[in-house]
């Protein structure tokens, strides 16, 4: 009920949304640095990247068959990154690497959006569950508060009645002409005591 109010910084909210673009841009930048350092038109380097990309793709496929969707997506992402790096490192112009970078960024956002939607659904379901539990506990708390208040009120009324009865007995005893022994000798019936069955 008294939860702290947490205000998230805008960078905290924006960082996951920028992650796919940052990842593909980093791969492109590293591939272009690799290109400038001798990978341009290097068949051996291109073959290495092709083998690594194929291996990562095969690993992703086998993980998908094994029922590991997160690891399979990671394998596919690594495979795509290696393929992008291989092409960007091998080609001499910048147009093909930029085209592949744009395609990879769009695909990364498409896959990430699916996971973001699922995370949002899970967060909303959790919030709904917590809200329902909070309402249920608040209702129970209100009922128990009413019950305790009623018990306190009954006890207070009983105490007030006992106080008034004691005051009446004291007042009666102070009346002029009141003689308790005369009442007892007259044989008046004794008032029954609570719980006394005669």
Image (cartoon, helix red, strand yellow):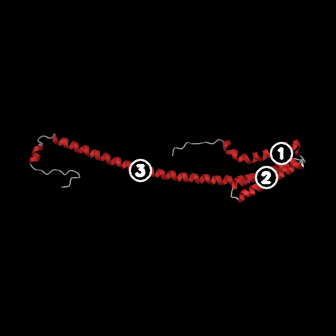
**Residue 160's image quarter?**
top left
Q: Viewer-nearest of labels 1 and 3?
A: 1
- Residue that appears at 38% across and 48% down: 148
Quadrant placement of the C terminus: bottom left
Residue at mark 2: 80
Residue 1 vs residue 191: left or right?
Answer: right
Residue 152 vs residue 78: left or right?
Answer: left
Q: How many marks?
A: 3
**Mark 1 nearby-residue class (10 Å; few <14, some 14–19, many ≥20):** many
Question: Is residue 8 depicted above or below 196 in this figure?
Answer: above
- Tell me if residue 96 can be seen: no
Say which label, 2 or 1, has the lower sequence index.
1
- Residue that appears at 65% across and 54% down: 118
Residue at mark 3: 144
Residue at mark 1: 31
**Residue 66's image quarter?**
bottom right
Image coordinates for residue 87, horizontal then vertical, percent: 85, 50
Say which label, 2 or 3, has the lower sequence index.
2
Q: Viewer-nearest of labels 2 and 3?
A: 2
What secondary structure is marked by label 3?
helix
* Residue at the limit of the structure toward the bottom, as seen here: 65
- Residue that appears at 45% across and 52% down: 140
Image coordinates for residue 141, horizontal then vertical, percent: 44, 49
- In the image, 53 versus 101, the foreground residue is 53
What secondary structure is marked by label 2?
helix
Image coordinates for residue 35, horizontal then vertical, percent: 87, 44
């Amino acid at each position: 009920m008294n939860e702290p109010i947490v205000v998230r910084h805008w960078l905290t909210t924006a960082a996951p949304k920028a992650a796919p673009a940052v990842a593909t841009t980093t791969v492109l930048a590293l591939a272009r640095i690799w290109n400038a350092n001798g990978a341009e038109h290097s068949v051996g380097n291109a073959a290495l990247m092709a083998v690594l990309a194929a291996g990562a793709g095969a690993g992703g496929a086998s993980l998908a068959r094994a029922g590991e969707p997160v690891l399979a997506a990671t394998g596919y992402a690594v495979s795509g990154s290696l393929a992008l790096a291989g092409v960007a490192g091998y080609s001499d112009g910048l147009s093909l690497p930029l085209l592949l970078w744009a395609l990879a960024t769009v695909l990364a956002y498409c896959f990430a959006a699916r996971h973001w939607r699922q995370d949002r659904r899970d967060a909303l379901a959790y919030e709904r569950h917590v809200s329902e539990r909070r309402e249920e506990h608040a209702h129970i708390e209100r009922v128990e508060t009413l019950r305790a208040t009623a018990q306190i009120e009954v006890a207070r009324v009983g105490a007030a009645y006992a106080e008034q009865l004691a005051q009446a007995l004291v007042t009666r005893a102070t009346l002029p002409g009141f003689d308790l022994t005369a009442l007892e000798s007259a044989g008046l019936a004794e008032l029954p005591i609570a719980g006394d069955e005669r």
